[in-house]
Amino acid sequence: MTTIKLCEKALLRVDEVMLYTGWGENTVRNELNHPQCPYVVRKGNRLYANRKKLDQYLDSISGI
């Protein structure tokens, strides 16, 4: 089995977003369920974060 680093993945699951950002599960789920979330990808009833758009979002809120 090949291991893929989080920084190489296009879509991140909720648990991976938690590791990537340091946010808790409730925060991640609340962000992904927000109607204006710019980085959410919905596949059926599953939520994913587009990593590149998440990075852009984190840059925008950090003031960089």
Image: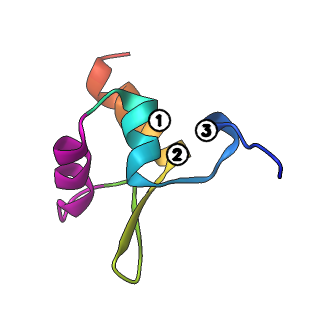
Q: Secondary structure at mark 1?
A: helix
Front-most of 7 and 3?
3
Q: Which amino acid type corresponds to the residue marked 2 in the rendered image?
A: Arg
At label 3, counting other C-alpha atoms closer than 10 Å, the crowd grade (few under 14, some 14-19, many 20 or more) is some
Task: Tell me which corner region of the image, top left, top right, bottom left or bottom right, holds residue 45.
Answer: bottom left
- The residue beneath circle 3 is 6
Query: Where residue 24 appears, x then y in whole percent?
Result: 24, 36
Query: Where residue 44 appears, x then y in whole percent?
Result: 40, 84
The Cα–Cα distance between marks 2 and 3, rounded to whole angstroms, is: 9 Å
Task: Tell me which corner region of the image, top left, top right, bottom left or bottom right, holds residue 48.
Answer: bottom left
The Cα–Cα distance between marks 2 and 1, rounded to whole angstroms, is: 6 Å
46 up-or-down from 18: above or below: below
Q: Secondary structure at mark 3?
A: helix
Query: Where residue 20 appears, x then y in whole percent?
Result: 46, 32
- The residue beneath circle 1 is 55
Q: Earlier in the sequence, mark 3 or mark 1?
A: 3
Q: Specify the quadrant that holds the C terminus.
A: top left
User: Residue at image x 65%, y 48%?
Assistant: 9
- The residue beneath circle 2 is 51
Q: Which amino acid type corresponds to the residue marked 1 in the rendered image?
A: Asp
The answer to whether mark 3 and mark 1 are in CB contact below 8 A is no
- What is the span of residues highlighted in magenta in the rendered image? 24-37
Q: Is residue 6 left or right of residue 1?
A: left
Query: Where residue 8 appears, x then y in whole percent?
Result: 70, 41
Q: Which amino acid type corresponds to the residue marked 3 in the rendered image?
A: Leu
